[in-house]
Image: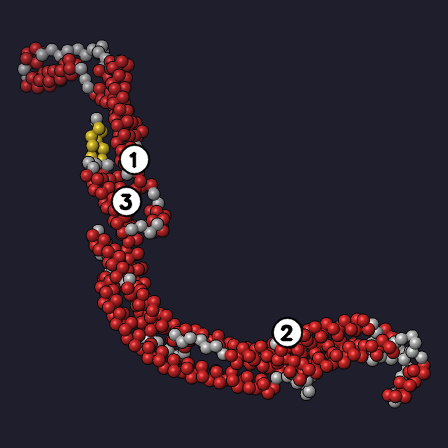
Amino acid sequence: FKPPMHQLKDTLQVVCRDMTKTLLVVPRLWEHFTREKSERDRILKQQLEEAGDLAAANAIVLPAETTKKKKSFFEEISKDDDCCIRYVKDVLRGFNNCAAKLGEKLKFWTGSYQKIVSQDKDKFICRYQKTQRSLTIVGQDIKGYMEVQREIQEEDPKIVIDFIETDFTPLKIALMDHCVQWQKKLTDLLNENARTEMDKLLAEFQKNTEILFSPIDDMDSLKDRVKLLEQCRKDDEDMENRITPIEAKYAKLAEFEVIPPDEELARKAQMRPAMEKFKDTLVEAEIRINKEKKNMKAGLEQDLQSFAQGLKDVKAEFGKQAPYKSEGHTCDSAFGVLHNFKAQLDAKRKAEEDFLPKLELFGIEAAHYKELEWVDQEMEKLNTLWEIRDGWEQEKGKLVVAKFKELNTDELDEMAMAFQGRIRKMIGKDKTVQNWPAFISQKQDLETFRNMIPLIQNLRQESMRERHFNLIIKEINHPFDPRSDAFNL
C-alpha cells in the first residue's frame, strides 16, 4: 500500500495528539464573555470621557483584574488519562481492524492472479514451444488469458473499508498488462510457427524447381532428378495437409486481432498459387527427365555392348598371354602377367558395379558375364600353380647348396610328397589343369626329384668305396670329392 500501513498508523497517532492540542486555543465561555464585556466597557468609558460626559463615564465600573483563573480545557483533559487514552485506543483498534481487512483484500488480488505474475514468461514459452501443442490448445490458452483480463477489468478498484478509502487501480492495470503480455507471447509464438512453416514450404517449391530444371550432365544427376521427382510427387499428394494447418494458424491470429506485416500476408497469399504452379512444374520436369532418360538409356546400352566386347577381348588376350606353359616364364614373370590381368579384372569388376545403379534406374536386368568368371577362375588356378612352383624352387634352391653328407632323405621325400599333395588337390578341383604344360612340367619335376632320392640314399651308403666314386667321376667326366663339405647336389 501507499502509504505503508505503519506510516499510516504513525500519522493517525500524530493526528490524535494534535487533536488534543487544539484545546489549547479553546477558551472557557465565561472568561471569554467577561473579557469581551470589559473591553467594550473600557472603550465606551473612554469615548464618554473624551465627550465630556463624566457622569456617564463614572457610572461605568470596570471589573478589577483577578489572577485567579480556572484551568483551561486542555489542562483539564490532557491530565484525564481515561479520556485521552481511550479515544486514541479506539482509533488505533479501528485502524488495526481496517488493516486486517485491507490485508485480506490485497491477498485476494495477489492470490487470485498470482500465476500470471510469478512465472517467467520467456522460459515458459520455450517449454511451451517444445511440447508441440495443437492449434486448439493454443487458442484455448490465449482465450484463457483474455478471460482473466476480462475478470480483472470487471473488478472494482476503489473500495472504502471502515474509514480508509483504497484504490487498487495501479495493481489492476499491472495485472491487466501481464495478461496482455501473456497473450502477445502466445500469439507471437503462433505467428512464428506459421511463418516458419510457410517459409519452409515456399522455399521447398523454389529449391526443388531450380533443381528439377538444372542441367542433367551425367547418370548420377539423372538419378537424383528421378528420385527428387518421385519424392515431390509423393509430397504433392499430402500438400493440402501441409497448407491447411498454416492457413488455420493465420485464421486463429486473425481471430485474436493479430495482423502480421503486409509482406508476410503477401507470402501467405502466394502459397496456393505456388502449389498449383509447382504441380505444373512437376509435369514439365517429368517430360524433360524422361527425354534425358531415353537418351542416356541408349548411351548405356552402347556402353554395355562395349563392356561385353571388352570382356571377350580380355578373355582372348588371357588365353594368349597367361602362363599356362613354364617355358619362357620365371615365377616372377608369371606373377607379373597374372597381376596385370588381375588389375584389368578389378577394373572390369568396378565397371560392372558402376553399371548396377544405372541398370536399376532404367529397369534393365543385370547381365551375367561368363567371360569375367572364367578369367577369374583361370587366374585363381594359375596363381595356385605358380605359388606351388615358386615354393618348390625356393626349397630346391636350398637343397642344392646343402652339404651332401647332412641331407636327410626322409625329410626330402616328405617335402616332395607335400608339394605333390597340393598338385593332386588342384586336379581334384579341376581336372583340366593336368593338361597345362606348366602343370605337367611341375609334376614331372617333383616325380624326378622323388626318383632321385634312392640314388642319394645309395651314394650315402657306408659301403660306397673310393673306387666306386672314381668310376662315377670317370662316367660323368667331372671330378668331385664326396668327403668334402663343399660337395652338394
Total labels drawn: 3
Residue 469, image x, y percentages: 91, 83
Residue 339, image x, y percentages: 61, 80
Say which amino acid is labelled 2.
Gly
Q: Mark 3 points at which residue?
A: 178
Say which quadrant the N terminus sits in.
top left
Task: Please tell me whether mark 3 or mark 2 is closer to you in this view.
Answer: 2
Residue 17 in view of the camera: no
Q: Name the residue under label 1.
A: 111
Say which amino acid is labelled 1.
Gly
Task: Give the camera-side residue of 392 and 187.
Answer: 392
Say which residue appears at 89% left-offset and 75% top-offset: 461
| Mark 1 / mark 3, whichever is N-terminal | 1
Apparent side of residue 405 relative to residue 118 in the rendered image (left or right): right
Residue 46, image x, y percentages: 10, 18
Q: Distance between the residues labelled 2 and 1?
A: 97 Å
Query: How is colour applied across the structure in the image?
Result: secondary structure
Task: Give the camera-side residue of 309 and 344.
Answer: 309
Say which quadrant the C terminus sits in.
bottom right
Label 2 residue SS: helix
Say which amino acid is labelled 3.
His
Does 251 appear above or below 377?
Answer: above
Task: Give the camera-side residue of 431 and 368.
Answer: 431
Q: Name the residue under label 2.
A: 428
Apparent side of residue 113 relative to residue 304 in the rendered image (left or right): left
